[in-house]
Image: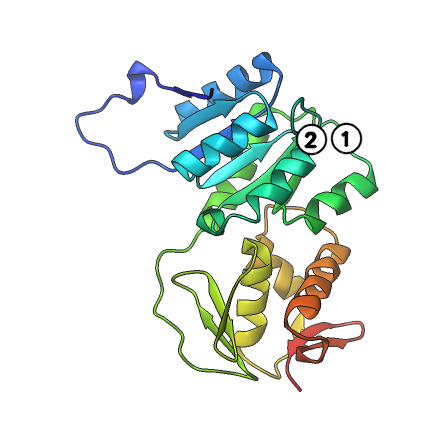
Amino acid sequence: MSKIIETASLDNTYQMPRQKILLVDDEPDILELISYNLLLEGYEVHTAKNGKEGLETALRIRPDLILLDVMMPVLDGMETCTLLRKEPSLSKCIIAFLTARGEDYSELAGFNLGADDYITKPVKPKVLVSRIKAMLRRIKGPQPLEEIEKHGISVDRDRYMVLQHGNEMTLPKKEFELLSLLWSVPGKVFTREAILTKVWGTQVVVGDRTIDVHIRKLRAKLGDELFVTVKGIGYKFGQ
């Protein structure tokens, strides 16, 4: 089973609740190196050595972020991500792949499965920690329930829940944030640059097609007519 790694340096008289990070990788050296650097930053770090163990641990501890290797025994990273995204209790969890596979098709497949980021090995520990910090900064605190219905859609930002004509729907984190952004001002055209900045942040490098993939998934789930492409500029919600 997985283990939680603690160090004496983090044993303070009083601590604010620490963000939980789950590392899933079958290489012990990588787990040790990443864990060490994250512990120095004050995170609560858990580890698992394969996808099955990672899934079980995630359901138990409900981490804020999961760093997931692709090539693993028992369950690989892609299969694990698919199962994680089916769990409503993990809807707010950020999932990032950390892998030596840098091919475009693998990266695109990861985003299609609901991943929030894709980091290619080798990566310097300080750079990786910076990327993780950037992803965790995008976790917003509880916000008021948005009861206004727009084009049959209402968004509950507190529970990360979408209601379409009264029917509840849970979306992966990035799909939810993209919908929430476009839905916030129906008819307004959001440029690709604005979408990338507000949804993915300035320190995460993703391509334009990442937006297209997420828009395509939202159209399939909520209706093609709700999302309008403005060629050469970006997207808007509603007419």
Image quarter in which the C terminus is found: bottom right
Give the class, few, some or many, for how many residues have Cα within 10 Å of label 2's Cα (few <14, many ≥20): many
Residue at the spot 29% in from the left edge and 38% down from the top edge: 17
Residue 83 is marked as none
Give the residue displayed 75% in from the left and 75% down from the top: 229
Which of disc 1 and disc 2 is earlier in sequence? 2
Q: Quadrant of residue 222?
A: bottom right
Report which quarter residue 80 is drawn in.
top right
Tags 2 and 1 in contact by the CB under 8 Å rule?
A: yes
Left/right of residue 142 with respect to residue 117 in the rendered view: left
Q: Tell me, for residue 70, which label it has, or none.
A: 2
Q: Which one is in front in this view, the residue at disc 2 or the one at disc 1?
A: 2
What amino acid type is highlighted by mark number 1? Arg
Question: Which residue is painted at 54% across and 19% down in the image?
Answer: 31
Q: Determine the secondary structure under disc 1.
A: loop
Q: Position of residue 78 (x, y in %)?
A: 69, 37
Q: Is residue 187 above or below residue 77?
A: below
**Residue nearer the viewer, 207 or 75:** 75
* Mark 1 residue crowding within 10 angstroms, few (<14) / some (14–19) / many (20+): some
Q: Which mark is residue 101?
A: 1
Residue 33 location (% of width, % of height):
53, 17
Outermost residue toward the bottom in this view: 239
